[in-house]
Image (cartoon, rainbow, N blue to C red):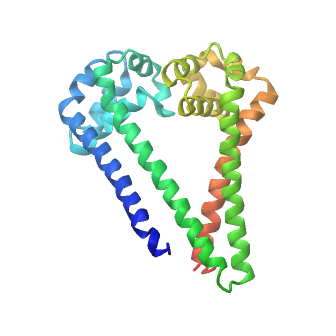
């Protein structure tokens, strides 16, 4: 696998990743038992928080999941949470001293996942180097080339999304002035690289959602989405689909190669 002189760095890096995950979960656990009741008291009009309290219960995992969902409301919310805009609105005025119990674990987990992704890429390059250095069948080389193509397409899609988020996002958002969620993301997510990427990702999701979902979550934006300019629509949607299809293609070819023994 990895050269002996890099073993320590590689294993130490995984140790840091696991430590970040542990710290994130430890903070969530503390908040679940010592801050959750205070956090939920601030959601008066939200049905989502009260439903979660009943359905998830007061067990260990239930309380931790309730903390995570409140943390998502104060940052990058899920599609399901869009169906309760009042919860997202109340999260905007959430006290800062309580908001940190959702934000800090999220930052730690994102750092851990980013590190894990980079380490997996490192491992993949090392596996590729060792594979092509040995006699290999044409079918295996073709499978490897397909996997590399999927990774390249994914990287190109991410680069395209980053470019659009920095140089076209203001123009794109100007066509969605009636959308509460677009305005909310601009206020909450900010103008950093991660914030801009999240704002663009949400708009791409809105453009791909069906009308029934939008009518329940963001009805004021429906007319604007219907009139959204086609060139900008393509600029938003195509990189998103490229990223999704390249990830799906990578998984299909990798699992198929393993199953049929091509990548054994």
Q: Image quarter for residue 162?
A: top right
Give me the residue at 28% from left, 31% from top: 53
Horizontal placement of 167 versus 119: left or right? right
Give me the residue at 63% from left, 64% from top: 252
Find residue 173 and report its horizontal and vertical position in percent. 66, 20
State how many labels appear.
Answer: 0
233 is higher (above) or lower (below) than 152: above
Name the outermost residue toward the right. 231
Quadrant location of the C terminus in the rendered image: bottom right
Give me the residue at 34% from left, 48% from top: 20
Find residue 187 and report its horizontal and vertical position in percent. 51, 17
Horizontal placement of 5 versus 66: left or right? right
Name the outermost residue toward the front. 5
Horizontal placement of 142 versus 11: left or right? right
150 is higher (above) or lower (below) than 1: above
Q: Image quarter for residue 65?
A: top left
Give me the residue at 63% from left, 56% from top: 248
């Amino acid at each position: 696998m990895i050269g002996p002189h890099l073993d320590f760095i590689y294993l130490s890096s995984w140790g840091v990743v696991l430590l970040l995950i542990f710290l994130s979960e430890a903070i969530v656990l503390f908040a679940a038992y010592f801050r959750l009741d205070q956090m939920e008291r601030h959601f008066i009009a939200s049905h989502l928080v009260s439903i979660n309290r009943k359905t998830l219960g007061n067990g260990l995992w239930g309380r931790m999941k309730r903390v995570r969902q409140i943390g998502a409301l104060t940052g990058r919310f899920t599609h399901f949470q869009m169906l309760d805009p009042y919860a997202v609105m109340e999260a905007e005025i959430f006290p800062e001293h309580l908001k940190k119990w959702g934000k800090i674990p999220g930052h730690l987990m994102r750092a851990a996942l980013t590190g894990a992704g980079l380490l997996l890429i490192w491992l993949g390059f090392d596996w590729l180097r060792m594979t092509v250095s040995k006699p290999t069948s044409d079918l295996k080389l073709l499978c490897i080339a397909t996997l590399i193509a999927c990774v390249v397409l994914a990287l190109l899609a991410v680069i395209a999304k980053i470019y659009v988020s920095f140089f076209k996002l203001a123009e794109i958002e100007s066509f969605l002035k009636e959308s509460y969620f677009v305005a909310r993301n601009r206020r909450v997510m900010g103008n950093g690289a991660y914030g801009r990427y999240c704002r663009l990702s949400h708009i791409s999701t809105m453009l791909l959602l069906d009308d029934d979902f939008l009518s329940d979550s963001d009805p004021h934006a429906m007319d604007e989405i219907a009139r959204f300019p086609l060139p900008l629509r393509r600029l938003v949607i195509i990189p998103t689909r490229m990223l999704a299809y390249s990830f799906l293609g990578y998984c299909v070819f990798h699992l198929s190669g393993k199953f049929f023994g091509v990548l054994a």
